[in-house]
Amino acid sequence: MKMSESTLARTGGQLLVNALKVHGVDLVFGVPGESYLDVLDAFYDARDHIKFVICRQEAGAANMAEAYGKLTGRPGICFVTRGPGAANASIGIHTAYQDSTPLVLFIGQVSNAFAEREAFQEVDYRRMYGPLAKWVAQIDRAERVPEMVSHAFHLAVSGRPGPVVLALPEDMQSQTATVADAARYQRVAAHPGAADMQKLRDLLERSQRPFLMLGGGGWSRQACDDIRVFAETNALPAGCTFRCQDLLDNRSASYVGDIAVGLNPALEKRIREADLLLAVGPRLGEWTTINYTLVEIPRPRQKFVHVHPGAEELGRVYQGDLLINSGMPEFAAAARALAPVKAPWAEATKAARAEYEAWQKPVATPGALNMSEVIAFLRRRLPPETIITNGAGNFSLWVHRFYQYTGFRTQLGPTSGAMGYGVPSGIAAKLVHPDRPVVSFAGDGDFLMTGQELATAAQYGARVIFLIINNGMYGTIRMHQERHFPGRVSGTELRNPDFAALARAYGLHGDTVAKTAEFEAAFERAWNAQTGAVIELRIDPDSITPRTTLSAIRAEALKSRAR
Ligand SMILES: Cc1ncc(C[n+]2csc(CCOP(=O)(O)OP(=O)(O)O)c2C)c(N)n1
Ligand SMILES: [Mg+2]
């Protein structure tokens, strides 16, 4: 044994950074604080192994760590200071929880000497983060750093993946301990039993109109490939749930659309009329089930098979004919290995695919800039390895409906519906995959929640193309407002900065587009820019969804009031 680090006294800060190295961490995202100076100092020594990406606000840092977790399947790492830093980071932790993304958040904490006095920025993170994380703990003794960090990594990736929070009291960080490092963590996952797979095959064989629904976290490239082969060899029609559209290559003959807000009515009908619903991965939440109406609770009308990595999710809302607790890679490999069944539904799958293709055709919209045409152009123009990111708002409906995601992790979007995700996730994507194009979508409201991270993009040379869809309002909320309180606009108008000028102030290329025909040239300028780029797309505020207009919604609501 060479002069092992385990025989040297190390500070808690050094033990922590060494533990990150042991677990294969290469990038961490954070905003500094005086509450974790010893850790920052240990990062100095590890700078050849671990890059500390300095962010401008903790929401940006936490969202970047979340995107890292989604992209790699390894825990995204985020470092923030106590109180205010921890509060800012919470949005990314909530998204990691809802999206089942592995993440470990480290928070500097007041010294144990001052604990429970409400010392400067002191918060009890166990209580603050209790419902938002799989585990929240505080490492009070330096010698327990290897053990507790190892526990955090195991938990973040195992079962239903998710976030873990560890608080680091200042005195622990500077204490020394002589203790061995842990070994690298392993992912622990359940496998489907042979009897489960046989029953699944029997159900499929007896079915006339099966439907495969893919969603949730914990997938891998191999798992997506395996499930695609399973779907294609059995000619199954398959849909992806809200913002999980990249789990099946949208060009596959089996892909028939996404199951979310703006659901294709033809697809909805097929799901309702299915006699076997095979849900692999999704929790079947509110948006995927159209407010819990698409699939009956607690006993679905269809024969129902639910596969999920978390045992606690199975039978939580939906009872099933077959509930399988399994990791996604483990289930997908077993599904691929199943002997194919005769597929009397093959023609119906072709029809469903044709309905999806028709649904993707651009639509007429009010105003000079048609978002469906813009996305159709990008679908043709962007190479298949492109990563598309977005935050939350109606603007994302255009992307989800008219783009074709080409496979695993070509999409990063918050199923949590958190605004402000698109910019930081775009930056993280470019830092993880510098060789892949990244196009990030935001609404005007959405963009300004984390737009200051353009400085981070510039600082690290992350050449993302940011597209801001500007309708001068919190459009989604305005839409709901017109539906419920027609004509009474309240709390939803926005007066925006000149986004192209803002981009230039950050050192990025900036452009503004107000007509469909101008977009192509503007996009090529952005593509060729040596820096990242922002294109502001000024759309007609009336163009609120691909299906309807704001004025039509208002007129309809007024009419039904008059009735
Ligand atoms: C962090 C956060 N705050 C508030 C909301 C509620 N919300 C959902 S969509 C939306 C408006 C989004 O506005 P914008 O980004 O301009 O997109 P648009 O709907 O206009 O296309 C709001 C305020 C949210 N989802 N997330
Ligand atoms: Mg808007």
Image (spheres, rainbow, N blue to C red):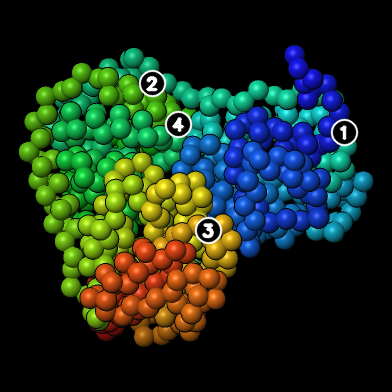
- The numbered mark, 1 or 4, whose residue comes first in the sequence reads 1
Which of 324/243 is in front? 243
Residue 99 visible in the displayed image:
no
Disc 3 crowd rating (10 Å Cα; few below 14, some 14-19, many 20+) is some
- Above or below: residue 267 compared with residue 48: below
Of the residues tagged 1 and 3, which is closer to the observer?
3
Residue visible at 53% across and 48% down? 66
The reply to whether the C-beta atoms of the residues labelled 2 and 1 are less than 8 Å apart is no
Residue 152 appears at what percent x and percent y? Answer: 64, 34
Q: Amino acid at mark 4?
A: Pro
| Label disc, if present, on residue 176 of the rendered structure | 1
The reply to whether the C-beta atoms of the residues labelled 3 and 4 are less than 8 Å apart is no
Q: Amino acid at mark 1?
A: Thr
Seen in the image, is 487 located left or right of residue 276? right
Residue visible at 46% across and 23% down? 190
Q: Which residue is mark 3?
A: 461
| Label disc, if present, on residue 192 of the rendered structure | 2
- The numbered mark, 1 or 3, whose residue comes first in the sequence reads 1
Q: Which residue is mark 4?
A: 309
